[in-house]
């Protein structure tokens, strides 16, 4: 009898262990938290980590192969590596959305990145310094890096790429009709954009990703409608920080940090006025 009871107990223990193991194996694993990148509190999970330690030539080749941009300019140098890293990580941070593919598609894949000196106040521009290229002045980027204001560099990169995305506006696509209607209702978004609808579009998109940019208009809680537009129409629901009105957890730049300035839109404002934009 004792042997029989002991056998039953052993069988029961094995069965219980099997059930426990099966239950444990069936539990879903929590996804690993996404590591914030410079200037972006909640980026896409990294698909293409920055290739630390590689040569400049290798990194240049990999930017073209990975992200589809041809390169030009004299500032692709070792001294510019911190700026190049911010550019790379910003592109990688939106890779779970269709942003890059969409803007490349507007130019049939023929978009370049030009790292070179830009005359005047601008730190970046689209198709002005070099036609068909987003130009970025990495020597000016360094001033923001020295102030710890990487968030504004993220905003600048996304802002200039937004001009590429918006380069089909004369065809009056659906997203542009919706944005012009929204702009007529909501009006001014940022000091830089002022009354320019094209610059407002680029800043609405740029600050949406660059949530750690100092003085981000979304932190005021006054621009829910613009936030919703960028979220739903440009980034397919992906959010890169907290809701508008909530300040993201970011390191603050030094007092008096200089604001990186985008270039003017590829069309002067007075021409926009004539075209009704």
Image (tube, rainbow, N blue to C red):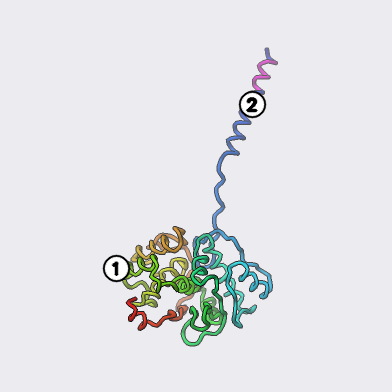
- Is 20 or 104 nearer to us in this picture? 104
Q: Mark 1 and mark 2: span between their CA atoms?
A: 69 Å
- Select label 1 or label 2 by which is in front: 1
Relative to 150, 190 lies left or right: left
Question: Which callout, 1 or 2, points at the residue further toward the start of the chain?
Answer: 2
Residues rendered magenta in the picture: 3-9
Q: Which of the pair 192/269 is nearer the observer?
A: 269
The image quadrant where one finds the C terminus is: bottom left
Membership of 6 in magenta stretch: yes
Q: Which of 178 and 24 is in front in this view?
A: 178
Residue, far left: 185
Which quarter of the figure is the N terminus placed in?
top right
Secondary structure beneath dot 2 equals: helix
Residue identifier under label 2: 13
Mark 2 neighbour class, 10 Å CA radius: few under 14, some 14 to 19, many 20 or more: few
Magenta-colored stretch includes residue 61: no
Does the CB distance between marks 1 and 2 fall below 8 Å?
no
Q: Which residue is drawn at 60% across and 76% down?
A: 71
Residue 31, image x, y percentages = 55, 50
Judged from this view, the residue extending furthest toward the top is 1
Above or below 220: residue 132: below
Q: In which quarter of the image is residue 259?
A: bottom left
Report which quarter residue 232 is drawn in.
Answer: bottom left
Helix, strand or loop at disc 1? helix
Task: Locate residue 181: give its quadrant.
Answer: bottom left
Q: Is the magenta stretch mostly helix, strand or loop?
A: helix
Point out which mark residue 5 bears. Answer: none
Q: Which residue ends up furthest to the right in the rendered image?
A: 3
Q: Mark 1 points at which residue?
A: 185
**Residue under the image location 34 percent in, 77 percent down:** 195
Query: Where 140 falls versus 203 (above or below)?
Result: below
Asked if residue 37 shows in the view, the reply is yes
């Amino acid at each position: 009898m004792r042997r029989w009871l002991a056998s039953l107990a052993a069988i029961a223990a094995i069965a219980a262990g099997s059930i426990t193991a099966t239950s444990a194996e069936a539990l879903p694993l929590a996804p690993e938290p996404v590591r914030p990148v410079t200037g972006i509190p909640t980026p896409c999970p990294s698909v293409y980590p920055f290739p630390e330690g590689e040569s400049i030539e290798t990194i240049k080749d990999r930017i073209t192969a990975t992200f589809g941009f041809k390169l030009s300019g004299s500032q692709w140098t070792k001294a510019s590596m911190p700026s190049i890293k911010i550019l790379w990580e910003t592109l990688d941070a939106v890779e779970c959305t269709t942003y890059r593919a969409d803007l490349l598609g507007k130019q049939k894949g023929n978009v370049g990145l030009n790292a070179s000196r830009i005359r005047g106040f601008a730190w970046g521009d689209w198709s002005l310094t070099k036609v068909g290229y987003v130009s970025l002045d990495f020597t000016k980027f360094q001033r923001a890096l020295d102030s710890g204001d990487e968030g504004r560099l993220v905003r600048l990169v996304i802002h200039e790429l937004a001009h590429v995305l918006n380069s089909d506006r004369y065809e009056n696509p659906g997203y542009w009709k919706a944005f012009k209607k929204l702009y007529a209702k909501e009006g001014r978004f940022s000091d830089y954009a002022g009354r320019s609808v094209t610059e407002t579009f680029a800043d609405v998109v740029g600050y949406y990703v660059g949530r750690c940019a100092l003085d981000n208009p979304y932190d005021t809680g006054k621009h829910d409608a613009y936030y919703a537009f960028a979220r739903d129409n440009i980034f397919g629901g992906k959010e890169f920080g907290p809701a508008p009105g909530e300040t993201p957890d970011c390191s603050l730049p030094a007092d008096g940090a200089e604001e990186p300035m985008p270039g003017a839109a590829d069309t002067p404002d007075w021409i926009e006025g004539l075209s009704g934009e």
